[in-house]
Image: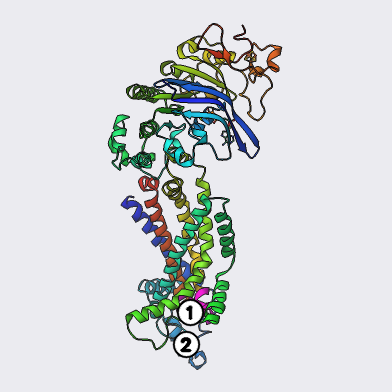
Amino acid sequence: MSNRYVVKKIVGALLTLFAVVIFNFFLFRIVDRDPLTKYRGRSKLSLEQRETMIRRMGLSGSKWDQFVAYIKSTLQLDFGRSFDSTRPVLREITDRLPATLILVGVSTVLTICIGLYIGAKAGWARGSRFDRVSTSTTMVLYATPEFFFGMLLLAIVAGRTGWFPTGGLRDVGTNNGFVASLLDRTHHLVLPSLTLTLGYLGSYSLIMRTSMLDTLGEDYLTTARAKGLKESDVMTHHAVPNALLPSVSAIAISFGFVIGGAITTETVFSYPGLGLATADAIRNTDLPMLQALFLVASAAVIFFNLVADLTYGLLDPRIRHSI
Amino acid sequence: MSAVLEVRDLHITYASSSGLVPAVRGVDLEIAPGETLGLAGESGCGKSTLAMALLRLVPPSTQITGSIKLAGQDILTMKPGQLRAARWAQASVVFQGAQHVLNPVRRIGRQIDEAIEAHGSASVSRAGELLDLVGLGARRGDDYPHELSGGQKQRSLIAMALACDPLLLIADEPTTALDVMVQAQILQLLDNIKRERGLSMLFITHDLSVLSHTADRVAVMYAGRIIEVGAGDALLRNSLHPYSKALTASFPIIGDPSSRHQPRGLAGDPPDPNNLPSGCPFHPRCTVAIDECQSVDVQLRHAADDEERSVACVLVGKS
Ligand SMILES: Nc1ncnc2c1ncn2[C@@H]1O[C@H](COP(=O)(O)OP(=O)(O)OP(=O)(O)O)[C@@H](O)[C@H]1O
Ligand code: SF4
Ligand SMILES: [Mg+2]
């Protein structure tokens, strides 16, 4: 893979992000006529105070002035203050980001590993018992919305057995050492990440199964068999590496849905990450928060697609050499 | 010395969505050590099917009856482990259409060495040595298939086929997709290798003219059967079956793809294996057919005037 390819992809990602920033400007200027409708304590504000606030939010002056001010502050990562907590939006986000990164990270890794494994095995043994059982299961998983898994796990596993906490990030008042705190956080992470994993496992494994089926008839598999290779080697060294290629792009595209899934999952488990913050911000029409959260979500999708593009280049020598 | 390959009464029937396709319908053939048998016939007559069946590489749903003995052992009754051990060690294939035969995301050298490793030989790489042998150069082992030209791919396939020192090399139209110059080089290469190593070879082609240099014996196939077989030069110079006559009279122009499906001087299309004509399957296209041809499905039999020759035609070999 040439440096030019990497640079090209990174520049492309930055341009996309910039387009989102511009889109964001217009999106949040058409939602509400009075941006302070939902501001707490609005009634106590004098007219002057209102104007100062509106100016601080960059909502005064001509559209062009507003735009320039908006771009400037966005570049400085200044998103204003949350209507709800009145703390700086940036602080709100950096405080909650780690929780979501861990939740989405763990679930994504699990979904990809388990999903690709099941999909590859099912496609390879098309029509076998494993295929029939796993495909009908993943179809059901695929069709079920993740809040349903969340509520089910919450009611049965957390509620009935009490084996797992029903929500939150950690137990309050447990502050005894690193290991204990790590265990506690992991304990809280199990059900939310299981929910998110179950929610997206189906789509990843169905994607992999389909691309596996597409490679089954390829001539190079016959060549590999002719050479006397074991079926398991034909699968792992020849079928899977080729079937991975289309899966990588398809998985990257569906990553946006995982972010949506994080919002529902965090809400169900009151897991204090960006997803819960998004749900709260929507409920409170906390425009500054929403604007920044929208940007973060878009940046995550763009970043994930960039990673997929680069991975694709690594996996496929034809791409690696041609660009 | 006993034959390297001995095929008896081989029938191969594909199970396709539109029904059973009898692609090979009773073939007998044998190849002696060091001998090259040329197998010729139009597209769709069952050449590749026959070649693939020799290592049991046809789809699992395919019915195969008869026997295929490689070095005395019947491929059709082997257990999976025995079959894997026989593949590539007894016979290897230079596949038709090199385009998709190599794995696009695996290095050439790896694809050669994995054959050796599958047969339990030491893990020393022989890929470089083999690539040198076919004139590609050892360095090419690090390349991926898309980095090679058509002729280079074909050379790497030949190197791959030699990896386990097979007794029999099955070359399925090894030069079809190549231009004339490269075609000649590949034929030369195969010929040299065969001589140096004393290999037996099954050389499949739709183009009889390439067989005049390579084949000790020639078999002509039509609609899933061998309709004429004999010593190479004698058959090519003086073919007896009306179909072989039409083929030899109209050596297709090398490198002209249109001559592949429609040899000059031969009207009509090859028969559809699903819907074969009655009697001699060639009769709708035969210029010398008589009434009997529509009802009598004549078997291969010795021609009266040539000991080595067998022909399947009512007009030939009646004594
Ligand atoms: N997997 C399959 N399923 C069903 N029918 C098949 C299959 N493979 C080949 N056939 C049919 O069997 C017949 C023989 O095919 P085959 O590939 O052996 O011909 P061929 O002589 O090698 O032709 P060509 O010169 O085009 O390579 C054809 O009619 C073909 O359509
Ligand atoms: S048997 Fe009849 S139809 Fe067939 S090749 Fe001979 S003459 Fe022609
Ligand atoms: Mg063929």
Q: Residue at x 51, y 29 (%)?
A: B68
Residue B134 lies, in percent from the top left, at 32, 29
User: Which amino acid type is shown beneath numbered disc 2?
Assistant: Arg
The magenta stretch spans which residues? A264-288
Residue A55 lies, in percent from the top left, at 43, 82
Residue A186 lies, in percent from the top left, at 41, 76
Q: Nearer the viewer, residue B272 or B200?
A: B200
**Dividing the picture into quarters, in which one does residue A292 lie?**
bottom left
* Residue A285 painted magenta: yes
Residue A59 seen in the current view:
no
Residue A253 lies, in percent from the top left, at 49, 59
**Is residue A85 positioned above or below A197 on the image?**
below
User: Which-is-in-front pick, marks 2 and 1?
Assistant: 1
The residue identified by callout 2 is A50
Q: Residue at x 46, y 21 (%)?
A: B37
Taking the image as four quarters, which one is ligand 2 found in? Answer: top right
Question: Is disc 2 in contact with disc 1, using a CB cutoff of under 8 Å?
Answer: no
Q: Secondary structure at mark 2?
A: helix
Mark 2 neighbour class, 10 Å CA radius: few under 14, some 14 to 19, many 20 or more: some
User: Which amino acid type is shown beneath numbered disc 1?
Assistant: Phe
**Is residue B160 positioned above or below A236 on the image?**
above
Mark 1 neighbour class, 10 Å CA radius: few under 14, some 14 to 19, many 20 or more: some
Compute the Cα span from label 2 to label 1.
47 Å
The residue identified by callout 1 is A164
Q: Residue furthest bottom?
A: A44
Residue B27 seen in the current view:
yes
Looking at the image, is mark 2 or mark 1 earlier in the sequence? 2
- Badge number at residue A5: none
Chain letter of mark 1 equals: A
* Residue B56 painted magenta: no
Judged by its main secondary structure, the magenta piece is helix
Q: Are marks 2 and 1 on the same chain?
A: yes
